[in-house]
Structures are given as structure tokens and as C-alpha cells.
Image (tube, helix red, strand yellow):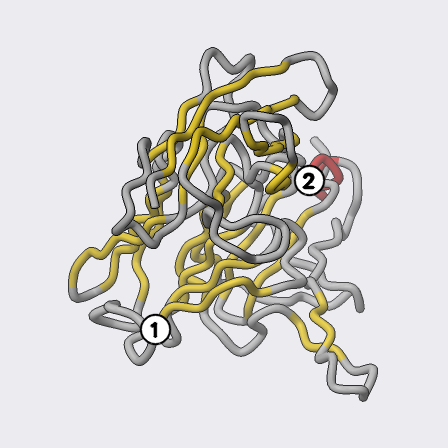
Amino acid sequence: NDPRNAGQLLLWNEEGEEHSGKIYALAEDKNGYVWVGTEKGVLVYYKPWAIFSEEKPLATRPKVARNDGSNLADYLLENESITCIFVDGANRKWIGTKNSGAYLVSEDGLKTYQTFNKSNSPLPSNEITSIAVSPTTGEVFIGTTMGLVSFKGNATEGEAPADKIYAYPNPVRENFNGLISVLGMQSDSNVKITTISGKLVYETRSLGGMAQWDGRNMGGEKVKTGVYIVYVVSEDGSSTQTTKIMIVR
């Protein structure tokens, strides 16, 4: 009986003006925020429940600083038509567009980690139709109007509670130059890698349930042949786990 809830929900921006009537993508992230893809960029409902109580519930446009000394900022992908949005295990957003490929942005959308288009990647088309991320391996599948490609991502869904962590490749052979992945942990776990004698060589936080190591120590040098211990502690300290990585140089 409330007329504010009747008919189509309009998108109201910060100025109280209707932003867009064309919505191509919706995704709820791990904070409960709803991300909306339109033909004029990205909007976020930080209070999605407000659509039932406010006459003009606010759809915020994330502002990205230019970092050029001008103190100016631009709205996230404001000139792009957004075709799809996917939230990965680390709560980052994979955003597909109609004309300029795909973007991986931070949890809040204020930092762009990677861009994928025809000129810098194997994408066969810049028109993205869908994106999905494997919750167990982190592999990213990007659908385009000219076919499907995949990318080895670095974030998985966290385990709750984690049963057993594991690393791959393991052992790490002398001809391997990629990243070593540790999987199966809870989201945002603290990860420490030490020598068998306990000397710390690397420390990071997991992206969702996955962490990666380039096989180098804190000084950027490749570690020597040996067994290395991975210690994982959950964000709240309630769970600890270990595994081993054998490295052959």
C-alpha cells in the first residue's frame, strides 16, 4: 500500500537526480552491498534495505581519485556500459563492459588491479557478456561475443572452517618460475612461510581462501633448496594450520 514501493525502482544519485533506467548487471558483495551495472558506469547500494523505507534511496557512484596532483576524481567507469559484475572470494569486483574489456577492481572499487582487452590479453573481443570465478581454484572465466577465455586468478572462496590447507605445485622443481599457491584456508587469514629452522622468509594475507608466494625471501632473493613451513592463522585467531613446501633449485 506504500506508493513509494509501487512500480519500477528508479536509480537516484547523490544529487537526487535519476541516474539511469538501463540496468545490465546486479551483484551482492560480501558486505551485503548491491552493485549495479548501468550504461553509465557502476552504482552501489550501501543500504539496500532503504528501498523499502526511503522515497529516493541513494545509489552511490564510487569516486576514483586521479592521483595526478589535481585533487580531482572520476566516477568508476562512468563512460562505460557495464554488462556484468562478479564478486570473487576476496570481495573484489570483476566488471565486464560492452566496449573496453574487463576490469578487476578492489573491494570498494577505488583501485583497479588489472584490465583485460584485445590489445593486452588473449581476449577475442572487448564486448564482455559474462564473468565467473571458480570458488575452489580461483580460475576466472570471461565470456565474450566471440568466445570464452580463462585466466588463472589468485582468490578463492574461504573455507569455514578450513579442513586442510595444501600448496601447489609441490614439490617446486628447478624449472618452475611461476607463483606457488596455498589454498583451503579461511578468508583473510594471516600466512607466514619459514625455513625448517623457523626463520621467516615471507608473510602475507590470503585473498579469500588463497595465498600466493613467488618463492623469494623478504629481500627479493630466490630461496634455496629445502623444505619450507607454511603457518596459517585465521583472521580471528581461532584456527591455525600448517603445511610444507619442498623447493628444489
Query: Quarter-wise, where is residue 120 in the image?
Result: bottom left
Q: Are marks 2 and 1 in contact (CB under 8 Å)?
A: no
Residue ID at (39%, 32%): 135
Q: Looking at the image, can residue 42 be seen? A: yes
Distance from label 2 to label 1 (Cα)? Answer: 32 Å
Front-most of residues 13 and 224:
224
Is 224 placed left or right of 1 in the picture?
left
Q: At which x and y percent is residue 113?
A: 54, 62
Q: 10 Å neighbourhood of mark 1: few (<14), some, or many (≥20)?
A: some
Q: Secondary structure at mark 2?
A: helix
Q: Which residue is mark 1?
A: 117
Residue at coordinates 47% horizontally, 11% vertically from top-left?
163
Q: Which residue is mark 2?
A: 48
Q: Residue 10 placed where, x, y %?
A: 62, 55
Q: Name which quarter of the figure residue 3 lies in.
A: top right
In the rendering, at what x and y percent does residue 226 appear? 43, 33
Name the kind of residue labelled 2 in the image: Pro
Of callouts 2 and 1, the N-terminal one? 2
Which of 187 and 171 lies nearest the eye of the viewer? Answer: 171
For mark 1, give the secondary structure: loop
Q: Please tell me whether residue 149 is drawn above or below residue 123 in the rendered image.
A: above
